Structure formats: structure tokens, C-alpha cells
Image (cartoon, rainbow, N blue to C red):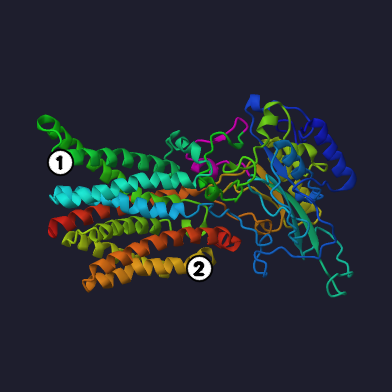
Amino acid sequence: MIGEGTKSTNQRRHSYVQEHVEVGFFTDPTVCIGCKACEVACKEWNHVPDDGFVWSGNSYDNTGHLGASTWRHVMFVEQDRQKGNQIVGSHSLGNGDGEDPFRWIFLSDVCKHCEDAGCLEACPTGAIVRTEVGSVLVQNDVCNGCGYCVVSCPFGVIDRRPKPLPDAGGAFKCTFCYDRQKSGLVPACAKVCPTESIVFGRLDDLRARATHRVQELHEHGYDDAQLYDPRETSVGGIHAFFLILGEPEAYGLPPKPQVPTIYLKSAWTAAFATAIAAIIATLLAFAFFS
Amino acid sequence: MPDESRLDQLREEAWQKGAVTGRGVDIAGGPIPRKLATASPSGGGPGYYGQPVVKPPVWTWEIPVYFFVGGFGGMSAVIALAAAIFHHVDLVHTAMWVAAIAAILSPLLLILDLGRPHLFINMLRVFKPQSAMSMGAWILTGFGACVVPGLIALELHVHQVFGGTVDQLLRVAAGVLMFGSAFFGMLLATYTGVLIGATAIPAWFLHRTLLPIHFGTAGLGSAAALLELLGHRIAALNFIGFYAAGIETVLLIWLSLDKHGAADRAIHEHRSGWLIRIGEIFNGPLALILRFFGLVPFAAISFLIGALVSRFGWIAVGKVSGSDPESVFAAERY
């Protein structure tokens, strides 16, 4: 077994920051009960301001999406599909009879802490850094709110906090509870999760645990269970990865996320070519039409 | 103050009641009628209640205006250098003034758009080639550091404020600084295309090659148009006007042929699509036709309007495309 084994360290003290061990979150919707303890704990611990009370009508999700003031977001996905070996009843809410497969999936979304992070690459001030445990952290006192990270995140996680919220103008996202981790504590969301749907631990342990869990689910008839950890794209894998049932699109997750720096080469080539063409055209204009 | 016992309490509450309520995350009373999660409220492909997958840009009017000002300012320095080489003394003077005004306006516009303007100086805290925003900050700094002293040296030389050796030194300094201005200027006018091209916004990154060509050429044409309107009706600027409007016409055709379906529909539909089209027609075919018939001032005005409108258009496209989950899915499946 790798590291500490496949057990979580959700309720244990640790010294990963001091030991420079890569850690992560593994979030498993098949055991999530949609209690939102992670959202509440995150907001309370990190003093994240409330950003409005909106009744969305989208199942029990009134948070909407991750953003500057939402660092954990529990999704409520309703699908007319069978869940595992679920017995499909005839007590339909819809047409009253016949088979009516339905499943309700909860998934706690969070910053992915990419291996190759778009926000970190884009940040012109150096406010966004990589920590000892491999997470991506925004230094609030350095960020001047240019907004470039917002359009550079392939997952739409980071955002600029609007006025009149406290600390407005800066970019915010999940800190991976870096303050807690430095003191040997577990991130607040993982600590409060009653079913260990959010598991905090060493990245290698989590990957082993996740692979095992997917096998287990397949054995129990959850044929569409898969891991969401885009390691084959330029993002190079994520440190907060997910088990999902069905396609990533249903969770608002991009199927093939790319770090935008891969577009730099072609864009700069076009820029230099345009600049040189402009100089030549201007010199020719003056040389022949003077 | 939250502490560890509060977190234990939350965990207990979740376990006991199955739900935890708190400020900002309240669960509304149920039961809520079933609502299948799809890409858009009207149904369509897979998605999560039409929620955006990437975040649309938070930039406001300052950024497109900066793209416009930085574009004509940067290319104006290029024209100034060429004019200096071919001894158009009056034009050098005007072009350097245009560039210097742009060099002062541009940082002001950028600072105005920052979420925390008082921390603007942090832009020069690091030098980061992999960030187009960082490179832009340095390009703009280099441009300002060349254009403003360059213009001062030029003015002192032209008005013969000092004589003898000092004047000779000023002449050399003006020459070197104008060379630097042209170098940073051509980058200033084009890097903005890289800035929005190398992002996660589908309609932008799918056109990352077109964007720098468009922004740079629009900058060159705007600089020539502005100088013409300032009284320099010379054949060389007219040629540049033809060149820029010609390239913009080609780009208009390129954009209408190089369609990516749902991935870049923001360019062809919505209000953003209209802004792009109006901008491209004004600085492409319309400016070309007006110039062809010798209506130089009208061609110049048409080009300037087109260049400004299309900058607003591209930012609008980013907002529409970034808010459209299906465009992200389509771009990645492409």
C-alpha cells in the first residue's frame, strides 16, 4: 500500500506542508448526501462573505456555481437515468405509469488545483503561487484585480469579487485551507464531511482509493462510474479530482480542459508576423510614395 | 470566530439532520419539482442548468478603449520612425505627439479597470513570458519610457533650445528613442490579440491567429487615419490606409468562412456578432471603397469607427462565449 494507505486523513493532524507532500481532494458523489456542510464550513472558516440569497429552482442548488465568494459548491444533478442496480418503479411523478428511471446526484465542486494551472500562468503580479503541498494559492495582498486569471481558468473557478462585498476587487478562489494545513489541520470542507464524500489526503493515496472505488461501483452495476481527472490534456491532471456518474458535461465540467498557455505560440507568431508586416508596409509606403 | 469545535458541530449536524443550513447556502423548502439539468434552460445538450463552464471576462469599457488607443499609439510610433528615415519632419512631430498621448492614456485606462487600482505597480513585480498580461505591462512600460523622453528630445532638438554638442546628443537620443518607440509600439499594437487569444474563452482562442493580425492592422490603419485627419494628406499615409483596409477586408472574409458552429457562435449571432460585423465592414470594405474614390477623410473616419467598434465587439464576444456552456463543450469536442 502507498503512503498512509487508502484511508482518509480527514480527522487526523498531519505535517504535509512541512514534508512537502502533494495532497488533494477526492470527491465521490455516490456517498454525498447533499447536506452542504462543506459549503457552510468553507464560508465560516474562511470568512467568505454571503453573496446573495437567490432561489434558483434548480433542484436544491441555490448557490449556482463556483466564484469569488463560493469556494465549495454542491451540485444537485437530476437525470432520467437508472442509478446502479436501482429498481425502476412505476410510481412516476410525470405520466403516472410505466417505468420512470430517475437519479439524483450530489457532487461538491471545488477549485481543481491543476497540475498546470491557467490562473497561475496568467497572473501578471505573481500573486498566484504554488504551495508546498502542490495547491494553487492567491495571495490576496498582492492581487491587483486585473481579471486575467478569470478568463484563463479552463474550469471557470476563479473570479473577481464585485463591490460592495468586503475585500472587493481582488480575485478569489479556494485556498485549499492553506492556513489550516500549515498548522497540521485538514481543510474545513473535508473535516466536516459526514460521509467522507470529500476525502483529503496524499495525492497518490487518493488516486489508489479512487481507482478502487470505481472498480467497486462497476461491480455494483454503476456502469457509467468514471474518474474525472484530465491527465491526458495540457492541464496534466488535477489535485482535486472527482468520481462522476455519466459524462462530465452534466456536471458543468469541461470534457477536455486545456491550459491556455498552449495557444501562446501560434498567437505570438501571428503578432510578430503582423508587426513585421506593418513595418515593411510603412517603410515601403514612404520609400515609394514620398 | 470559527474554531475546531464548530467544525465538529457542523459535522454532527450534517450526520443527524442530513442538511446543514447557513448564511449564503440556505436550502429552500421542498419539495421542488423535478428539473433535468441541461446545457440551456430550453433543453438542448448535456450541461448543468445552463451554468457557464468558464467565466466570462470581467473587463469593462476601459479595456476595448485601451486596445484602440494602444493600437493607434503603438503604430503611430512606427509611422514616426519611417517618416524620420524619409525626412518628413512635420509628420514625425505629429506622429510622436499622437504616440505620446496614447502612451499616457493607455496606463490610465488599464489602472481604471483594475479591481484594486492602488496596487497597479504590482504589474511590474514579476517578468513572466508565459503571461501575455505581464508581457503587455512591460511592453507598455517600455513604450512609455521611449516615447515620452523621445518626444522631449525631439522637441528640444527641433526648437534648437541648446546648441552645439548638446543639440547633437539630443538628436542622437531622439533617434535611438524613436527606434525604441517603434519597437515597443509594434508589439503594443499586436500583443492585445495574444492577450485575449490565449485564454479559455472558446470564441477567442479559436481565433488566436486572426486576433493579433486584426488588432495590429487596425492599429496601423487607425494611426494613418488619425494622422490624415490631423492634416497630413500624403500619398504614403494613403498607401498605408489602403494596406490596412485591404487586410481588414480579407479578415472579414476569413472570419465568415472560418466558422466553428456552436463553439464560436458569439461571433456570428447575438449583439456581439453585429458589433464584429459592423466594425469589420467599417474598417474593411467601406474604408477601402471610400479611399478608392478619393474620399480620404471619410475613409479615415470610417476606419477609426470600425477599429473602435470591433474592439468592443471582441470583448462582447468574450462575454457571450464565456457565458455559453455549449460553446465550451463544442470547442473541446472539436
The answer to if A275 sits in the magenta stretch is: no
Q: Foreground: A99 or B79?
A: B79
Q: Tell me the kind of residue under disc 2.
A: Arg
Name the side, left or right, on which A103 lies relative to A121: right
Residue drawn at (31%, 44%) of the image:
B184
Name the side, left or right, on which A46 lies relative to A127: right
- The chain identifier of the residue carrying mark 1 reads B
| Quadrant of the rendered image containing residue B160 | top left
Q: What stretch is highlighted in magenta?
A: A112-133
Give the mark nearer the N terminus: 1 vs 2.
1
Classify mark 1: residues with Cα within 10 Å, few (<14), some (14-19) or many (20+): few
Q: Can residue A105 be seen in the rendering of this structure?
A: yes
Quadrant of the snapshot with the N terminus of chain B: top right
Which of the labelled discs sits on residue B300, or is there none? none
Q: Which of marks 1 and 2 is in front?
A: 1
- Furthest toward the left, the residue is B164
Image x and y of residue A57, in percent: 76, 62
Residue B144's place in the image compared with A54, above or below, is above
Residue marked by disc 2: B271
As measured in the structure, the alpha-carbon distance from the residue carrying label 1 to the one carrying label 2 is 51 Å
- The chain identifier of the residue carrying mark 2 reads B
Q: Is mark 2 on a helix, strand or loop?
A: helix
Name the side, left or right, on which B77 lies relative to A250: left
Residue drawn at (58%, 61%) of the image:
B324
Proximity of marks 1 and 2: CB atoms separated by less than 8 Å: no
Q: Foreground: B86 or A243?
A: B86
Image x and y of residue A209, in percent: 73, 41
Which of the labelled discs sits on residue B159, or is there none? 1
Residue B192's place in the image compared with A140, above or below, is below
Residue drawn at (12%, 34%) of the image:
B168
The answer to if A122 sits in the magenta stretch is: yes
